[in-house]
Image (cartoon, rainbow, N blue to C red):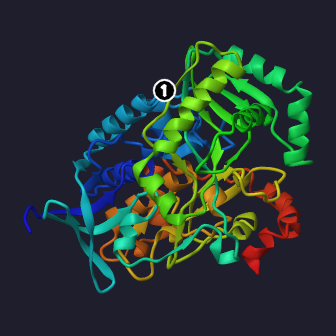
Amino acid sequence: MSAIRDFDLIVVGNETEGCLAAIAASRAGAKTALVVPPGKLLGGLLTECGLAFVDRDSRHLTPPEASPHDGLFGQFLAAARVPLVSLEAGQGHRTLATMLEDAGVQILEADWIGLVVEGDRATALRMHDGGVLTARHFLDATPDGDLAETAGIRFAEGFSEYGIDRYLGVSPLPIVRGVTPETILETCERLAQDPGLEALRAKAFGERKFLDLDHGPDYILIGPPHLGLAYQRWREAHGFETRYPFEADGFNVAVIGPDATSWNGLIYFSQDPSTLLKLSREGSDAFFKLEASRFERFLQDELGWREAQVELPRGVYVRQTRHALGTRHRLSLGEIVANHDAGSVGTFCYYPDFRGFRAVAVPNPLTAHVVLETGLFHAVRNLGIASRAGGYTPFAHSLCRLVQYNVTLGTALGVAAAFAERDLGAVPLLEIRAELGRQGILSDDPAGLERNRNAQFALRSDPILKLESA
């Protein structure tokens, strides 16, 4: 093997979590490399897949530059000129590239094979071209824990450990051009008055509560499900065959231009783990490309948006595939509600999002401590993970899969890699937090922790969520 290069930390993956973890590590003094797939955008889910409506901490819905508790994620959004929640993909990629360059991170566009593990340590990353990259520490920032898998880490899939054959929904994230936000709002108000759609809502959702129709400078929150139900009714009337079952819901719509919007809310389902992993790794398949053309027809013919044109990003939003086992702590939703704070490197606040999984609604967003040991392994002491595949139970995954949570975890792991010799978990927590504070990226805001107890009764009384503590 040739081309051996040595680093303090090698981060694998083009996701935002990995990019920002590499930046924090380099700022802390670590010689850092970021290994990304050739030809893909930096930012992964937020850029390549098109998740333009960013799930930001629910306590901090102010402009990112005025939100000190959003950490390095907030600095990234501010640099990308995000007004509140809307991130344009190209701008996100360019901003991350600039931040990485400024921090001195070496970006390597290359395919890799896997880790070389000797005893309880990873020693090298074997590359597809026969080369080897060595490092003191490694960080898996792939969406599905692909790097950790090559080190022998095992995974649980979906909700299978509870005897539930179910995964969270999958969403293509179409960009709609030629329609103004005003037209979208007017249409949603009209559909809410349609008695047929209201009857469908009552039949499909019963007493389920939805968020109101809302809008801001760069978003439209379509809480009521009438538009999704209108699409479902139209699809069924045309007798379209579907590879993945479709369920109507509301939409998060990011405004990315005067007549351009990005839509998150088309929810499809697969219960096949290999299909979900393939969609996550390869992006939209032939079905989703066909479905994009159907959605365009629906907008034009059924809603009367004659100028609407639909574009489909290369990636697709796969909310859930698998969860790493063997982490030094596996965080549960019950622990989040109970304010588990052992090893906390920050906090993140959001509603647990069970898209397509009928769990009880909690009365307020939950404030979760970001626990360092959810990103550390017992068996491989110098390997970390910061992704939706980290050390979370399937129910905790509903909140912990979100990008900002894993950015906070990843930046702490990056800092640990700058100081640790052999074991990423050996660095004192106070030292990690002090360095995060020095960089101005400590995302530690206790506001909201006291409200978690409001959700305890709802969670205890739900028969499905009881499975987590059984």
Furthest-front residue in this view: 239
Q: Residue at x 82, y 58 (%)?
A: 360
As drawn, is 109 to the left or to the right of 256?
A: left
When asked about the image quadrant of residue 188, the answer is top right
Is residue 262 placed above or below 111 in the rendered structure? Answer: above
Is residue 123 placed above or below 401 in the rendered structure? Answer: below
Relative to the observer, which residue lies in front, 168 or 419?
A: 168
For label 1, the SS is loop
Furthest-bottom residue in this view: 119
x and y, in percent, of residue 66 in the image: 58, 32
As drawn, is 140 to the left or to the right of 192?
A: left
Is residue 376 placed above or below 248 in the rendered structure? Answer: below
Furthest-left residue in this view: 2
- Residue 387 appears in the rendering: no
As drawn, is 349 to the left or to the right of 143?
A: right
Answer few, some or many: residues within 10 Å of disc 1's Cα (few below 14, many 20 plus, some between 14 and 19): some
x and y, in percent, of residue 237 in the image: 74, 34
Q: Residue at x 88, y 26 (%)?
A: 194
Tell me the quadrant of the picture where the C terminus can be found: bottom right
Relative to the observer, which residue lies in front, 109 or 77?
A: 109
Q: Residue at x 29, y 62 (%)?
A: 9
Relative to the observer, which residue lies in front, 277 or 470?
A: 277
x and y, in percent, of residue 15 in the image: 42, 49
Q: Residue at x 41, y 29 (%)?
A: 91
Tell me the quadrant of the picture where the N terminus can be found: bottom left
Is residue 431 placed above or below 260 in the rendered structure? Answer: below
- Residue 120 appears in the rendering: yes
| Label tally | 1
x and y, in percent, of residue 372 in the image: 51, 67
Q: Amino acid at mark 1?
A: Arg
Kindly identify which residue carries mark 1: 81
